[in-house]
Image (tube, helix red, strand yellow):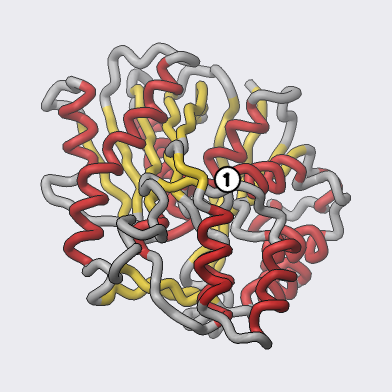
């Protein structure tokens, strides 16, 4: 049997914080750093980024007076993450019936709470206590692939299973007070968002199959997500795009991702919108057309990088368009690893 995504719902908070962050970061740079930062803002391809925090860097805001500790950030996560996840599920419910859910798979890397966010969501939805839950934590931007892979295996083993897959990330809870331009440019990418998908063996929506994973050699230092006393600290090396491009140009690495097909034989691309430089690296590494990643670039422009939720937003955009005959979904994250799967219409 093949698993299918019937529909995807998405949600973002109401506060657009992109320009507020740009102003805040600009104040922390010297006269040499500001012009470079402004150029990178212009080149980022991002127009909006959304946060559960209202005017977080303004006076009286979450970061207005001091950098809150990790405990305060986790309190905000426990309060806000379920609400955003439920908003995405509401959007999904408007697209597909959610009766008879048998399994719940939740992915998130921006917070911890116990009982887990999976239990909170299940309780708020009124799901039966017999619903099987899986929580995918701290995997970063490719966690959506891991969550969908769990759903894929469940659907293949149980034809009656109806799996609710949820990703929710509150990246804006982890702002760091730094004057290092590389760190500020990394934070420039990230935002909050949630997505929810219904997966089953019933042939509706798009088929998902042939999951793959590949890790670049000697790359574990390039993307790190460390837990500190003042939230989670993202380390994102400027080497990442070039390493991704080089890997995609290697026949062996490319073969794992494409199933030994040529890139021009792939009809649709759902690439995690981790940043403009990441999308450029994929485009150049695979030698695909400038419009091949249009859906990813549009998600980046409208929402920024929402960690694990980003790929789900791109898949939702593709599902709203023409039928996908033969596509590839791929995301990159800590490791440095690439994970993904093949997609196609029913």
- Residue 187 in the image, given as x and y percentages of width and height: 51, 66
Of residue 274 and residue 287, the one placed in the foreground of this image is: 274
The residue closer to the viewer here, 36 or 121, is 36
* Residue 263 versus residue 214 in the image, above or below: above
Look at 36% across and 48% down and name the residue there: 53
Q: 13 left or right of 103? A: right
The image quadrant of residue 92 is top left
The residue located at (39%, 72%) in the rendering is 176
Can residue 5 be seen here? The reply is: yes
> Farthest residue toward the front?
59
Task: Locate the C terminus by quadrant.
Answer: top right
Q: Is residue 330 above or below residue 202?
A: below
In this rendering, is residue 100 above or below 239?
A: above
Residue depicted at 51% across the width and 22% down the height: 6
Determine whether 88 is above or below 335 in the image: above
| x and y percentages locating residue 55 in the rendered image | 41, 51
Q: Residue at x 47, y 77 (%)?
A: 235
Counting from the top left corner in percent of width and height, residue 186 is at 54, 70
Residue at disc 1, secondary structure = helix
Residue 226, percent across and down?
Answer: 34, 75
The front one of 210 and 126 is 126
Q: Which residue is mark 1?
A: 303
What number of labels is visible? Answer: 1
Question: In the image shown, does 136 or 125 lie closer to the viewer?
Answer: 125
Q: Callout 1 environment at 10 Å: few (<14), some (14 to 19), or many (20+)? A: many
Q: Is residue 338 visible?
A: no
* Left or right of residue 323: residue 25: left
């Amino acid at each position: 049997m093949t698993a299918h995504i019937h529909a995807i719902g998405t949600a973002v908070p109401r506060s657009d914080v992109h320009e507020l962050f740009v102003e805040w970061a600009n104040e922390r740079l010297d006269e040499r750093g500001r012009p470079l930062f402004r150029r990178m803002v212009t080149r980022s391809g991002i127009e909006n980024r959304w946060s559960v925090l209202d005017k977080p860097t303004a006076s009286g805001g979450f970061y207005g007076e001091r950098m809150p500790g990790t405990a305060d950030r986790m309190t905000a996560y426990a309060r806000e993450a379920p609400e955003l996840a439920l908003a995405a599920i509401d959007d999904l419910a408007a697209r597909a019936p959610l009766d008879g859910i048998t399994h719940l798979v939740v992915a998130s890397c921006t917070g911890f709470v116990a009982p887990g966010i999976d239990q909170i969501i299940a309780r708020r939805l009124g799901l039966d206590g017999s619903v099987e839950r899986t929580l995918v934590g701290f995997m970063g931007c490719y966690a959506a692939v891991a969550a969908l892979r769990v759903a894929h295996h469940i659907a293949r083993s149980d034809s009656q299973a109806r799996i609710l897959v949820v990703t929710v990330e509150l990246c804006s809870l982890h702002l760091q007070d730094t004057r290092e331009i590389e760190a500020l440019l990394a934070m420039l990418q990230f935002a909050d968002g949630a997505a929810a998908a219904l997966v089953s063996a019933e042939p509706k929506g798009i088929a998902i199959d042939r999951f793959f994973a590949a890790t670049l050699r000697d790359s574990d230092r390039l993307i790190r997500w460390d837990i500190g006393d003042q939230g989670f600290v993202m380390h994102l090396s400027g080497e990442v795009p070039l390493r991704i491009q080089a890997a995609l140009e290697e026949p062996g690495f490319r073969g794992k991702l494409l199933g030994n097909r040529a890139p021009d034989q792939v009809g649709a691309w759902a690439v995690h919108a981790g940043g403009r430089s990441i999308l450029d690296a994929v485009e150049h590494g695979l030698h695909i057309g400038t419009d091949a990643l249009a859906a990813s670039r549009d998600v980046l422009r409208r929402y920024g990088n929402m960690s694990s939720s980003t790929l789900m937003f791109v898949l939702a955009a593709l599902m709203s368009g023409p039928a996908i005959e033969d596509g590839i979904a791929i995301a990159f994250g800590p490791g440095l690893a690439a994970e993904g799967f093949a997609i196609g219409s029913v």
